[in-house]
Amino acid sequence: MPADNNHFPPDAPPAMAPSDLCQTSRGKLKIFFDTSTGADKTRTMLQAARQQQAQGVDVLIGLVETHQMANEQHLLDGLEQLAPSRIQHLDGVHTEFDLDAALKRHAQLVVLDDLTHSNTSSRRHSQRSQDVETLLAAGIDVYITI
């Protein structure tokens, strides 16, 4: 052992390398699914997000389709919602998740609907699952339905 390290106790943890200090830990993914169609999985996901917020977690609604159902719409109250991107497409205007805005906002938890969604051609990624991977790599936790 080098002489300048002799003053550390033998059970001291190893020093962190400068690269370790810069690394972001990977986010965690929680998938909500149900065997039936309908809004149960979205409602359950929003309830879980509200519980996280009550525990002090910084929650951001990335994009959730409540289809204006009153039993779900009220679950969005008090949760910060990211403004969706509105994309003009051949068959009309599409509402899309704004990945860049979510990365800039960098909440602890981003909530999204539909992991299997195909993004419009003007987005960074062709699939929502790729958006989710980008969020996780940035250290952001994700709740999503499938």
Image (cartoon, rainbow, N blue to C red):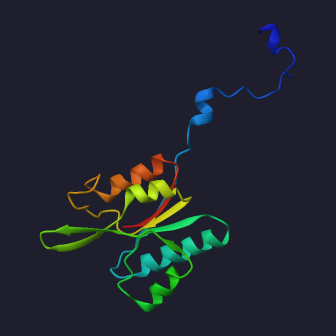
The quarter of the picture where the N terminus appears is top right
Q: Residue at the spot x=80%, y=15% of the render?
A: 5
| Horizontal side, residue 14 vs residue 39: left or right | right
Q: Residue at the spot x=61%, y=68% of the render?
A: 52
Query: Which residue is more in the foreground, 104 or 6?
Result: 104
Q: Residue at the spot x=44%, y=53% of the render?
A: 135
- Residue 58 image point, x, y percent: 59, 64
- Residue 26 image point, x, y percent: 52, 46
The image quarter in which residue 68 lies: bottom left
Number of marks present in the image shown:
0
Can residue 31 be seen here? The reply is: no
- Residue 129 image point, x, y percent: 34, 56
The quarter of the picture where the C terminus appears is bottom left
Most distant residue in the left direction: 90
Query: Which residue is more in the foreground, 37 or 120?
Result: 120
Q: Is residue 123 above or below residue 84?
A: above
Q: Is residue 95 above or below residue 103?
A: below
Q: Residue at the spot x=43%, y=76% of the render?
A: 41
Can residue 109 be seen here? The reply is: yes
Most distant residue in the bottom direction: 70
- Residue 123 image point, x, y percent: 27, 56
